[in-house]
């Protein structure tokens, strides 16, 4: 069964890599390793460096994210090998003329959701880690990050019972996770993550 599921995940990623449905998105499609995992991490969208490096969270935000995970016992290599890394949108959205990266629009998010919905169906995860407000808002109502960070929330996602454990975006442009109350809420979230059975099951 495990071999069959692995082959289904690989076939899914092959289809995903060919997707060009959003004309304003900048390929290539950024895909993590084809891992049959009970943990699903969901980012927002890749930045402009990820296309060259060919993996999610490969630049500055990724360095911060993996420091967080290393602080609770899992290094970057272990995480990438054992956790399925996904995103709300899989291609770089392009630059915002006013500065920073463009935020994907509702149509692009809906179009790309077919891929993540298929991944949830294939993986049937026990734990989903949405990173950043855009990712969190796909599964939880969120006005302010203080309303959700530092909590583990049990919910049905696509008819599957999962624990949602939101994290703030580790962007260098954001100061939220470096100042109170964000700093303390991030520490609380990481503590909850470290205690989760699926996280404990990662082979270090």
Image (cartoon, helix red, strand yellow):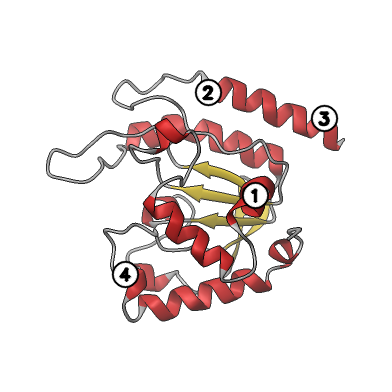
Residue 6 appears anywhere in the view: yes
Residue 37 location, x and y as percent?
Answer: 71, 47
* Quadrant occupied by the C terminus: bottom right
Q: CA distance from mark 3 to mark 2?
A: 20 Å
Mark 1, residue position: 83
Disc with the residue nearer the chain's start (4 vs 3): 3
Q: CA distance from mark 2 to mark 4?
A: 33 Å
Mark 4, residue position: 176
Disc with the residue nearer the chain's start (1 vs 2): 2
Q: For this view, does 73 lie left or right of residue 142?
A: right
Disc with the residue nearer the chain's start (3 vs 1): 3
Q: CA distance from mark 4 to mark 3?
A: 42 Å
Q: Confirm or deny contact between disc 3 and disc 2 (CB under 8 A).
A: no
Disc with the residue nearer the chain's start (3 vs 2): 3
Mark 3, residue position: 4
Residue at image point 56% right, 51% down: 41
Mark 2, residue position: 17
Residue 40 location, x and y as percent?
Answer: 61, 50
Instruction: Say which element carries label 3.
Output: helix
Q: CA distance from mark 1 to mark 2?
A: 19 Å
Instruction: Say which element carries label 1.
Output: loop
Residue 22 figure quarter: top left
């Amino acid at each position: 069964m495990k071999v069959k599921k692995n082959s289904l995940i690989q076939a899914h990623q092959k289809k995903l890599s060919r997707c060009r449905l959003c004309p304003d998105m900048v390929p290539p499609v950024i895909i993590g390793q084809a891992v049959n995992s009970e943990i699903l991490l969901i980012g927002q969208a890749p930045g402009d460096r990820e296309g060259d490096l060919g993996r999610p969270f490969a630049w500055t935000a990724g360095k911060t994210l993996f420091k967080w995970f290393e602080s609770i016992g899992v290094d970057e290599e272990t995480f990438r090998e054992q956790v399925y890394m996904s995103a709300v949108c899989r291609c770089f959205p392009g630059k915002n003329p006013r500065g920073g990266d463009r935020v994907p629009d509702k149509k692009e998010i809906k179009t790309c959701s077919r891929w993540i919905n298929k991944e949830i169906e294939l993986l049937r995860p026990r734990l989903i880690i949405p990173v950043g407000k855009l990712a969190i808002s796909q599964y939880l109502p969120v006005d302010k990050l203080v309303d959700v960070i530092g909590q583990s929330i049990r919910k049905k996602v696509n008819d599957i019972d999962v624990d949602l454990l939101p994290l703030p975006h580790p962007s260098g442009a954001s100061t939220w996770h470096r100042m109170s109350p964000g700093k303390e809420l991030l520490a609380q979230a990481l503590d909850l993550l470290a205690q989760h059975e699926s996280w404990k099951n990662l082979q270090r």
